[in-house]
Amino acid sequence: MRKLAWALLPLILLALAGTGHKTPVPTPPPQCELHQGDRIVLYGSGDDPDVLAWDSRFRLRSYHAAPFDEAEQLLSHAVLEAAGTRAQVVACVAGFVPSHSFETPEDAVGIMILSGPEKGIGKWVIGSDTRLRRR
Amino acid sequence: MARVTGTLLLTAFLLIALAFAVLGAFQTRESMARTFARQSQIQAAQTELEELLRLQIDEENSLRGYSLTHDSFYVEQYTAAAGEFDSRERQLRQTLSSQGLITAQRLVDQYAGLQARWRAAVAKPVLAHPTQQLAEIDKRNKFFSDQEAGVVRTIRAELAGQNDVLGRSTQAELDRSSYVRAFWLLLFGLLAILFNAFRSRLYRELEEERTTTEILQRAFRSEAIPIPHCEVGGAYVSASSHLAVGGDVYDVYRLSSNLALLLIADVSGKGVDAAVLTAFIKFTIRAIALRRRDPAAILSEFNTSFSQAVENPYLFVSMWLGILDTETFVLRYASAGHDSAFIRRSKNVQQLPVTGPILGVMEEPFETRQTNMQAGDLLVLTTDGLTEARTRSGRQLLDAGAMDLIAKGSEHAQELADGLVTSVRALSRNRLRDDLAILVVRPLRGAAPDA
């Protein structure tokens, strides 16, 4: 009986040591709120509900990250879409745009405009300027 | 001395602890008042900021209205909103400056700068050409609107942060002041307990001393012992009420079947030391008087003994000493600087003269005088507690006042002594400045004076 106890001792110690060790849980990569094919309307989250739509997601990002004067220079690459303009999501890059309003970065959403003067043109907007209509 | 120092020290500590506790409370109150005033200013700044934002939106809306309707009413609205915006912005800047909120002030500068640029880049072209639909201007309007919104958010966060900091510091100040006040109160309480214990010990010691002194004094002080054919009355009041001892003494002592020694003396000093000296006086005089019958000789011998026994050069004694023949009522007396001796005959009071110097001062001869007393006469011997008794206004009774009181007093020895004490107490409203001893001797009828 005593011999059996001595034999089991290393196993017990190993088991006890194992309880203190925890495997790190990997952080899941950020995911987009919107998905390709989602129908949305554009609606600004600020005081002015119109939305600036950009010709590339990099300019979109630069605009939000840049200081005032640089941001102003970039305006020529954007069009002002009236609030309520309909669109369809064609792409989404999660957490791509640094945000002044929120702590977490915003999604860059690639859209195809479905109404208004820019109907049929592809643009990029930030996630918080969109409202999901239908998935 | 140690007791007094201890009491004073403890009292000082108590007062210091109390002062710190009170001071701490006032400081906390002041600090809290300052914090609340600052918080109130920050809240006012927050309100002004929101008002500024409202005016900014008013400007934009007025401009939109004008762009849509071309009605000059909107231009007026725009101008009014712009004017008020500028005024409010100055006010906000002033509030922030008064509170030293540099970051917020810089942000407000930025906000005001953006609004100025918006007016130049957006409002001005629209006011100039309201009919033109300029997509570029709309875009810039949106741009400015977003930029300003961003700055306003930052100012809000900054002010809220400052408010939080103040709130936390207020809490910290409250905590700190509570601990500090608790400490001082605890210290105060402990000192009070200590003080009380010390005082109790002090009172106990004083009580023990008083009891000891009383016992001693009872042994030292004369009692109005009866002598033949005479009525004897006495009274003694100590100015040190808590000690009940003093430097006055009187004595009545039978030297033989028909001779009685009468003595009253006043020692310069008070308390236990004086009481011990009075005992020395009483028993030394008795011893000398048993050998000598001449009052002047007794005083003279005592003076020599006193100078040798008492080393303190500042101690001296005034003394009246008489030897009364209780059958003939012949009184032979000598007075060593003691002038508070009186004889009342019917209602006439006569002061007995001083016949020598105060004892312990110089070696001068003393003189014996003689007077014949009649039955009903009153020999009143007092110390200067009677003649120097003062009214509340500071007026002294003096010899004349004392003689007046004696003249009006009772014809019985004890009643007269008590009456004099009552009068002195009433005169000084029970606040005696000096000890008072009174000895009254009254020859009685029925004796056979043969003088």
Image (tube, coloured by chain):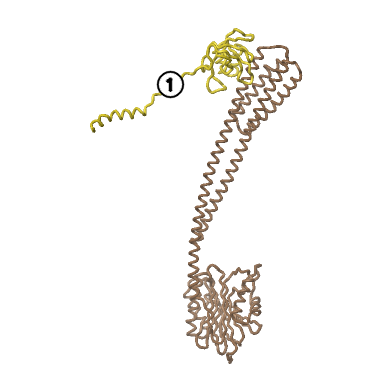
Chain colours: A yellow, B brown
Nearest the eye: B226 or A21: A21
Q: Position of residue B71 (x, y in %)?
A: 76, 17
- The quarter of the picture where residue A18 lies is top left
User: Tag count in the figure?
Assistant: 1
Q: Position of residue B74 (x, y in %)?
A: 74, 20
- The quarter of the picture where residue B102 lies is top right
- The quarter of the picture where residue B100 lies is top right
Above or below, comparing residue B234 to residue B111 in the picture: below
Within 10 Å of disc 1 (Cα), the crowding (few <14, some 14-19, many 20+) is: few
Nearest the eye: B219 or B279: B219
Above or below, comparing residue B33 to residue B153 in the picture: below
The amino acid pointed to by label 1 is Pro
* Outermost top residue: A120
Q: What is the secondary structure assignment of the residue under circle 1?
A: loop
Above or below, comparing residue B24 to residue B338 in the picture: above
- Residue at the location (75% across, 15% down)? B70
- B342 horizontally vs A4: left or right: right
- Pointer 1 residue: A26
Q: Quadrant of the C terminus of chain B?
A: bottom right
* Outermost right residue: B72
What is the chain letter for disc 1? Answer: A
Q: Position of residue B393 (x, y in %)?
A: 66, 67
Above or below, comparing residue B327 to residue B174 in the picture: below
Nearest the eye: B86 or B61: B61
- B85 horizontally vs B276: left or right: right
Q: Position of residue B375 (x, y in %)?
A: 61, 87
